[in-house]
């Protein structure tokens, strides 16, 4: 395919890893960071040691903290910033594109997993809303089981590109695909985004179980029942049930809830060992999306009338309403029920 100019916004571990995939595929990549010192380090040393130690970045990645430089002539814009920064950065992008005087809106994609606080909007919904003044954004979400630390080593990775726009979805698939990074397409952007966001909550719980001294039986039960309630909420919000059997759901849940590379799992483990949540967040040095997502998901489930007992339990721990041991006892003492319960509208799955 022809070389594309691609702006990757966010130079954390995942943004940097995705920039490397694109650069190795022969595209011109601009990696934007709000931190001028970080941009200078990447540009002069070809390293981003805070997030990916000992990794040498390709020469066709240009690092900058200048948004105009990042966006000029961009064919695609990839948001890889924390959920809490999406609206602000998107507004900056819109202002910059207006200043540049673009003729056609680039394809907009994101690889962020979370829900906006208070509004409970998915990332694609935020982006469509913010970009509305300058055009109808074609938004693609990239999600699935993928640790940056393994992608940069060319470990085999398979993820999902999801969009309501088939052409944009296949474009994203095309620019990322290579012999170690495989991309599948899915039209169900609701399911893919919700699965990617909600699995972080279950990963927190899985880590907390390990930290509290529980073993593989407990972890397997939590992951399985966690997938059940993720599916319940997703289907209630309009997602395709089959999406939750795919890479963006069960695949991402497995890797996030079992791996030491997962910051949500590591954060949960520290909480399970008795550390305060604020201390855990401060020590992590990177955003732990699961803490904020648990609050948003709990509120969203209440609004939708969807039962999510594990999410509710983790919410209570985060809010200081109950201890880990108390919520485990409450979960185990819940009313007896069958494992699989279907209603005609499929809103009560598992």
Image (tube, rainbow, N blue to C red):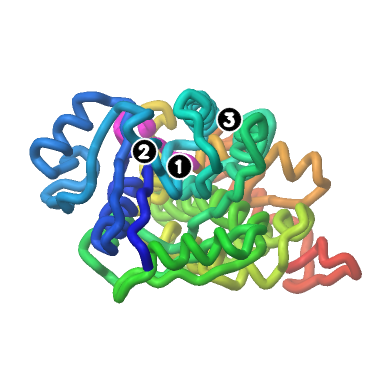
- Main SS class of the magenta portion in the image: helix
* Residue 1 sits inside the magenta stretch: no
Position of 348 with respect to 151 (left or right) is: right
Q: Earlier in the sequence, mark 2 or mark 1?
A: 2
Res. 36 visible in picture: yes
| Residue 113 percent location from the top left of the image | 51, 47
Does the residue at mark 2 contact the one at mark 3 (Cβ under 8 Å)? Answer: no
Instruction: Identify which residue is drawn at 43% across, 31% down.
Output: 277
Does the residue at mark 2 contact the one at mark 1 (Cβ under 8 Å)? Answer: yes
Relative to 247, residue 10 above or below: above
Label at residue 79: 1
The residue that mark 2 highlights is 10
Relative to 290, residue 58 above or below: below
Quote the CA–CA distance across marks 1 and 3: 29 Å
Quote the CA–CA distance across marks 2 and 3: 29 Å
Front residue of 336 and 111: 111
Does dot 2 land on a helix, a strand or a loop?
A: loop
Does dot 3 land on a helix, a strand or a loop?
A: loop
| Residue 194 percent location from the top left of the image | 62, 52
Q: Earlier in the sequence, mark 1 or mark 3?
A: 1
Q: Nearer the viewer, mark 2 or mark 3?
A: 2
Q: Which residues are magenta?
A: 280-289
The residue that mark 3 highlights is 319
Front residue of 118 and 121: 121
Does dot 1 land on a helix, a strand or a loop?
A: strand
Instruction: Identify which residue is drawn at 21% across, 47% down.
Output: 52
| Residue 151 percent location from the top left of the image | 29, 61
Q: Earlier in the sequence, mark 2 or mark 3?
A: 2
Position of 179 with respect to 113 (left or right) is: left
């Amino acid at each position: 395919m022809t070389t594309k100019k691609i702006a990757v916004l966010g130079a954390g571990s995942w943004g940097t890893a995705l920039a490397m995939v694109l650069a190795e595929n022969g595209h011109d990549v601009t990696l934007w960071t709000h931190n001028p010192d970080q941009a200078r380090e990447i540009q002069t040393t070809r390293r981003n040691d805070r997030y990916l130690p000992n990794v040498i970045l390709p020469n066709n990645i240009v690092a900058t903290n200048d948004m105009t430089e990042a966006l000029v002539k961009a064919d695609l814009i990839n948001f890889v910033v924390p959920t809490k920064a999406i609206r602000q950065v998107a507004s900056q992008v819109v202002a910059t594109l207006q200043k540049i005087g673009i003729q056609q809106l680039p394809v907009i994609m994101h690889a962020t997993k979370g829900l906006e606080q208070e509004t409970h909007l998915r990332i694609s919904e935020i982006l469509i809303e913010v970009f509305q003044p300058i055009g109808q954004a074609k938004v693609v979400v990239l999600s699935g089981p993928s640790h940056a630390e393994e992608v940069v080593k060319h470990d085999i990775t398979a993820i999902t590109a999801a969009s309501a726009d088939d052409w944009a979805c296949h474009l994203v698939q095309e620019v990322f695909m290579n012999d170690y990074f495989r991309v599948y397409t899915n039209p169900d952007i609701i399911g893919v985004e919700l699965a990617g966001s909600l699995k972080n909550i279950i990963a927190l719980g899985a880590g907390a179980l390990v930290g509290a001294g529980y073993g593989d039986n407990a972890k397997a039960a939590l992951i399985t029942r966690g997938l059940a309630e993720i599916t319940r909420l997703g289907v209630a919000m309009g997602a395709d049930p089959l999406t939750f059997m795919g890479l963006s759901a069960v695949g991402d849940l497995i890797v996030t809830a079992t791996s030491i590379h997962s910051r949500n799992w590591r954060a949960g483990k520290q909480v399970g060992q008795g550390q305060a949540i604020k201390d855990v967040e401060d020590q992590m040095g990177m955003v732990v999306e699961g803490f904020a997502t648990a609050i948003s998901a709990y509120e969203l489930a209440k609004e939708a009338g969807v039962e999510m007992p594990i999410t509710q339990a983790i919410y209570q721990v985060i809010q200081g309403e109950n201890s880990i041991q108390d919520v485990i006892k409450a979960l185990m003492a819940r009313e007896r029920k069958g494992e699989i319960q279907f209603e005609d509208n499929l809103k009560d799955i598992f």
